[in-house]
Image (tube, helix red, strand yellow):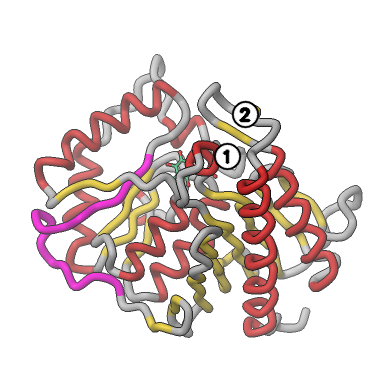
Amino acid sequence: MPEPHLSELLEVAVVVARQAADLALAHRLLGVADVGTKSTDTDLVTAADRAVEQLIRGLLGTYRPGETILGEELGTGTVADEAGPAAVGRVRWVVDPIDGTVNYVYGIPHYAVSVAAEVDGVSSVGVVRHAVTGQTWSAVRGQGAWRDGVRLRGSSCTDLSRALVATGFAYHTAGRARQARVVAGVLPLVRDIRRFGAASLDLCAAAEGRVDAYFETGLSAWDHAAGGLVAAEAGLRVGGLRGAPAGPDLVLAAPHPLYDQLHDLLDDLRPPSDPAMPDPAATLAGDSGH
Ligand code: LIP
């Protein structure tokens, strides 16, 4: 099977993210309709989420017909042939049509469209577009990370006690209780904590050095597939728990001198698994999502 051209995948991802972000913003300006819930009463989904993902699927069907896609709202499918079986191919698109849905519903201007292209299961192209400001972060594996033409290098912080750390929380009450205990343990040991509400933008903020590090548990692939590549290509170390790749158990992005300090603190603070209190990562593992 021929080697996909990463430059072509990047071009498609940029065009798709821009049009999707414009639709998301248009829906927001018209007023968010049909707000429903998914995994819990606080896990919101809107008609805009679905409309934006349908637009993304249609555009990918035009530009990349027959390739597979995983989206937060409509799951796994084949672009341009929703009913058909997933095509066997090397490229899979992983998309979050509106990352930062709670911000979106409340009119907080901080949400993004996240589009990643995996090649043979590895994120190889990632684009995150801020739907309000239009800022666009992009990365191609092995070729660096950029924001609107500016090369990104991440933070130079080496001391955890001077680190500004971003994080987020799951929608499950039990998981949030565990996450609250972890963040309570982190807070006294770092400069400060920030919770912005969109993982993809948190990872891009880390790539820019606007926060020194980011961690979260319970995320789905679409939350971090693009932003994680941007952070890695900006020179940060991006990974999961105890050497695992970034995933539902942990997404951690930090400059190399900080990574082990923060990872080991998080590992120490990680409550023992409690059957009465499912771990958000275990609950939300895989692509089932928030
Ligand atoms: C959000 C993530 C965020 C997390 C929220 C939510 P969504 O994704 O980007 O980091 O803390 O709980 O999962 O649901 O807005 O696409």
Q: Nearer the viewer, mark 2 or mark 1?
A: 2
Residue drawn at 80 percent across, 73 percent down: 63
- Which portion, as a residue range, is magenta? 154-168
Residue drawn at 62 percent across, 60 percent down: 21
Residue 289 tag number: 1
User: Position of 18 compared to 61: left or right?
Assistant: left
Q: Which residue occupies the extreme top position in the image?
A: 276
Residue drawn at 39 percent across, 42 percent down: 217
User: Position of 175 compared to 107: left or right?
Assistant: left
Mark 2 and mark 1 lie on one chain; the one further toward the N terminus is 2
Residue 118 location, x and y as percent?
A: 62, 66
Residue 38 tag number: 2
The yes-or-no answer for disc 1 within 8 Å of ligand 1 is yes
Q: CA distance from mark 2 to mark 1?
A: 10 Å
Q: Please, what secondary structure does the residue beneath circle 1 have?
A: loop
Q: Please, what secondary structure does the residue beneath circle 2 have?
A: loop
User: Position of 175 compared to 222: left or right?
Assistant: left
Residue 5 tag number: none
